[in-house]
Image: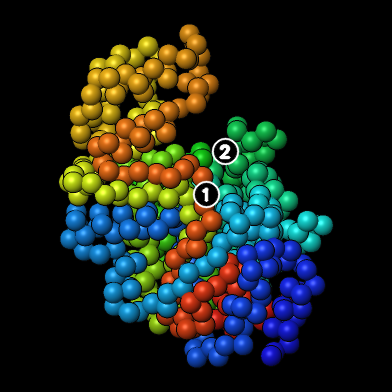
Amino acid sequence: MKRRDFLFKGILAAGAAPFVGHLGYNDSASVETDAICKSTARNIIFLVSDGMSSGTLAMADHLFKRKMGRLSTWMQLYHDKKITRAIMDTASANSMITDSAAASSAWGGGVRVVNGALNMGANGEEYEPILQKFKASGKSVGCVTTVPITHATPAGFCVNMPSRNQQAEIAEVYKSLKFDVMMGGGNEYFNKDIRSDGRDMYAEFSSEGFQVVRDKKSMQLLIPGAPILGVFSDSGVPYTVDQQSDNTISSSVPTLAEMTRKAIECMSLNKKGFVLQVEGGKVDWAAHANDTSALVYDQIAFDDAVTEAINFAEMDKKTLVIITTDHGNGNPALIYGSKADTNFDRLFNVRQSNEWILDNIKRGESVASVRERIEHAWGVGVKAEEASEIQAFYNEIKANGDPEDIKKPFRPLALLQEKYFSVGWACMQHTSDFVEFAAFGPAKDLFPAFLLNTDVHHLMLKACGVENK
Ligand SMILES: [Zn+2]
């Protein structure tokens, strides 16, 4: 056992990771830091489809096969036996069911923390985030995402923060970290007109030497060199299905694959390598909303980012690609029935997300209009009484009231969609499922068939031969 491995196991034994043993697993069960690393990776591309239940992966692959006539890239890698495949236990320090902050911290800091925290223990202990470790080793580092760049999953690779909700502060930390590429949504945490302290973070990043871009065209024109901040929407970027139906959005907001390609292009010039996290963050948001139309097309957009990563890694031969998720969410499924296959194929023709339907209904809107709206979004007609049930929720909005005042009927709309698409949901929250974990490229054999989320931290460092302090 090497010294650093001893130290790591010592930390666990000393109880710094309070959750160890909760599920009956202990550190020695899966941490194979003594495993022989046959080859070293120079780069890592870590792709996480946030909140991806196995039904999400399966349905996206069904859609690829039935609509596009090919497998998803993720499944193609399995088919071609190019991947080390594992399942991962995703628990946090205080629950079998993690949130995205604790999940990303487990990978990012190597220690399980309580839900909501970013790489900080109960007594204020700070666990050094993995991108800080890789940056110190000379590599370029960065994150791209479809949710705010200050959100839990990218932040868990970058910062120490008591709460994931401190996104305005996380933006400030990013400025001092000066990581090479940080791109996604989150204008509300950078824009002086929206931040409660009125700080103009764009101006501050620029004066620190960052190239700041706010739209797709400027992003594509970026040249490697100075660190990059790209922010393309107030909160998360629009769902893929909505982006594809709106030329204004699709011409101004880059896809996750486009952000991934640009990040690789900029960082791969570093001879010491790079480490990039790519997050399909809105897969999780779609699952919380039981928004089937949004979910499957955001998972497909995630797979397009996987394609970018694999294409680069196939050519480069020095890049470890990890493809996984941080936890299940909603546990959707295509459900058995005589019309299930044809109902599922209706997803070929959806034009808008359920969020688009519900965000656009106005108080006093007629049932006929709501019915038309649903039909436009889904490409399938619904009954007047079904549209009426959805419309009824909007009668609760007071005159001159804000539609935000009501709880939008995502769940009732999902139950209606299930009738026509045969896709049902177990819940609107995270689940404790073991999740899919795939590794491609040099050092892929380091990953055992069953691993804890915390193991990933230590194994990524080992894969690159970077000291695990
Ligand atoms: Zn979530």
**Count of numbered marks:** 2
Answer yes or no: do the residues labelled 1 and 2 have beta carbons within 8 Å? no
**Residue at position x 48%, y 54% from top?**
328
Q: Nearer the viewer, residue 422 or 295?
A: 422
Secondary structure category for the residue under label 1: strand
Spot occupied by residue 385 in the image (x, y as percentages of width and height)? 27, 19
Is residue 43 rendered to the left or right of residue 384?
right
Q: Is residue 434 above or below residue 202?
A: below
Quarter containing the N terminus = bottom right
Beta carbon at label 1 within 8 Å of ligand 1: yes
Q: Nearer the viewer, residue 12 or 96?
A: 96
Would you say residue 41 is visible in this rendering? no
Answer with the quarter of the image where residue 307 lies: bottom left
Q: Amino acid at mark 1?
A: His
Is residue 122 rendered to the left or right of residue 276?
right
Would you say residue 335 is visible in this rendering? yes
Quarter containing the C terminus = bottom right
**Residue at position x 43%, y 71% from top?**
438
Q: Nearer the viewer, residue 389 or 145?
A: 389
Q: Is residue 414 above or below residue 213?
A: above
Q: Is residue 464 above or below residue 390?
A: below
- First in residue order: circle 1 vs circle 2: 2
Task: Report which residue position mark 2 lands on.
Answer: 188
Q: Residue furthest top?
A: 399
**Residue at position x 73%, y 58% from top?**
120
Question: How many residues crowd around disc 2 within 10 Å: few (fewer than 14), some, or many (20 or more)?
Answer: some
Answer with the quarter of the image where residue 248 lies: top left
**Residue at position x 42%, y 74% from top?**
85
Task: Report which residue position mark 1 lands on.
Answer: 430
Indicate which label's residue lies in the foreground, 1 or 2. 1
Q: Amino acid at mark 2?
A: Glu
Spot occupied by residue 72 in the image (x, y as percentages of width and height)? 29, 63
